[in-house]
Amino acid sequence: MKKALLVLMGLVMVANAQTVNRTTNDVKIRQAMSAGGGNRMETVLYVKGQRMRNESAGVGFTTILQCDLKRTLTINEKTKAYLITPTDGMNPATGVSDGGGDPSSAPAPQNQPQRGGVVNITSTITDTGERREMFGFTARRIKTLLEKKASPDACDKDQKVETDGWYIDFQYSFDCPGQQQKYQPAPVRPQPGCKDEIRTKTTGSAKLGFPLIVTTTVYHPDGRTTSMTQEVLELSREPLSATLFDIPEGYTLAKDMQQLYGMDTTSMSATNQPTNSNTTSTSTTTAATTPANTPKKPGVLRIGLLLPNVQMSSGNATQAAEALRNSFANHLKGPNIEVVTLSARLPPLAIEEARRSQCDYILSASMNVKKGGGSMFGRRIADIAGAATGRIPSAGSAASGAIKARDEVTLEYKLDQVETAKSVLANKDKAKASADGEDVISPLVQKAAGDVVATTQKQ
């Protein structure tokens, strides 16, 4: 499954490396992406000169890449706040260049015996000859087939990937050095002591271009299939207002991610201070939560949120955990649901604290941000398919500036019923970032919150 996701995202999200005939300066692209017939997500991309705006439907966050100012704006429409993140390679906290280093690119250990076999990768590009009018263009149907055959002694395994799409001669102009360039796969450290010989072959010379609708299907050795569809729903070349690409009027600058998410830092500081010589409060109050000592209203469900466990190779994990918990609180709070924060870490203590706080449920979560990379096949597919599919990139991240292109985010969450101390929901979702700073976390939290609400309604 891990390799399948890598292949799918590599195919669907790689940059378009072809030169096409018609270009435009202002463009609006609304597209939908779905996997396996579900998990549909819509995004809207606006491009004007050196600026790009990206919106995710239903999330409430907008990101604006301002290349002329070398910064990204992350806008929270719920709190009417925005955060500025430099994009010039400088760490805003230290003023020192991040250096762009990637631990995954470090050389493999030396003096290890090499083993492996031969992996043959064959790609075939076919023009079906079918044509149809789409958005004022003549679209052509192109199919691609990539087959990987591994010898019995190879470290890798067999796999097959098919794409079926409609393409047009269109390219939008985005004047931002380094953002509209040919896809360059990140170097990946091979398995220790394992090295296959990769042999590639390409047949067919069909003309590709900008993808309007592409379905990618991965066939696994065990007979399973995984599919993803990317479809453009709207393609407009009308002039765009410059106000779309700037700070909205009336919005305030957040000093950090907590403020962007609506955390009441004053309340947090006050709550964490001792109230007298014998009592110390350890709970954290956010703008979307209810104080734990407030009596619960009749007919209202109360959910206790534990501090999530966050693992990431860069960035502030503690800050990310607080932001993740507050994001859950913002999505869950409603007329019939109250949310309180719990300070306990161990399950038995959490149950007892939840009972004292009159909670009906306890929600725990963990998030793991894994550095981008993948298998040799995934990298080869990305190279070949760079001309087969296009990327509609997004700029900035609503959840963490530490997210980089091809990072994989895994969100696990569990809902326990306080009365019975039994789990009523346990799930895990993944997403892969296609660009630096892309917000892949908010959609995961939104889906998880929806699952939690649906589960409580069934109980």
Image: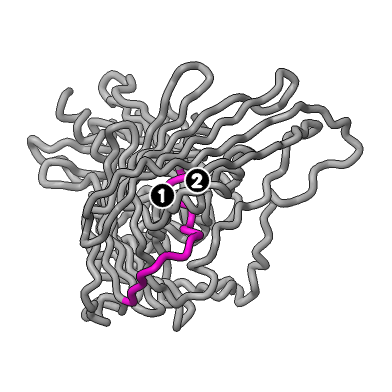
Count up the numbered dots: 2
Is residue 373 shown left or right of residue 292? Answer: right
The tag on residue 10 is 2
Element type where label 1 sits in the image? loop
Is residue 91 shown left or right of residue 71? Answer: right
Decide if residue 249 is in sight here: yes
In the rendered structure, which segment of residues is drawn in magenta? Answer: 9-25
Question: Residue 146's spot in the image, x, y percent?
Answer: 53, 35
Q: Quadrant of residue 150?
A: top right
Give the mark, 2 or 1, whose residue is nearer the N terminus: 2
Local crowd at mark 2 within 10 Å, few (<14), some, or many (≥20)?
many
Give the colouring mode of the picture: one colour
Tell me if residue 10 is in the magenta stretch.
yes
Report which residue position mark 1 lands on: 282
Report the front residue among 160 and 270. 160
Query: Residue at 60% across / 30% down in the picture?
Result: 148
Report the front residue among 332 and 225. 225
Question: Residue 321's spot in the image, x, y percent?
Answer: 45, 49
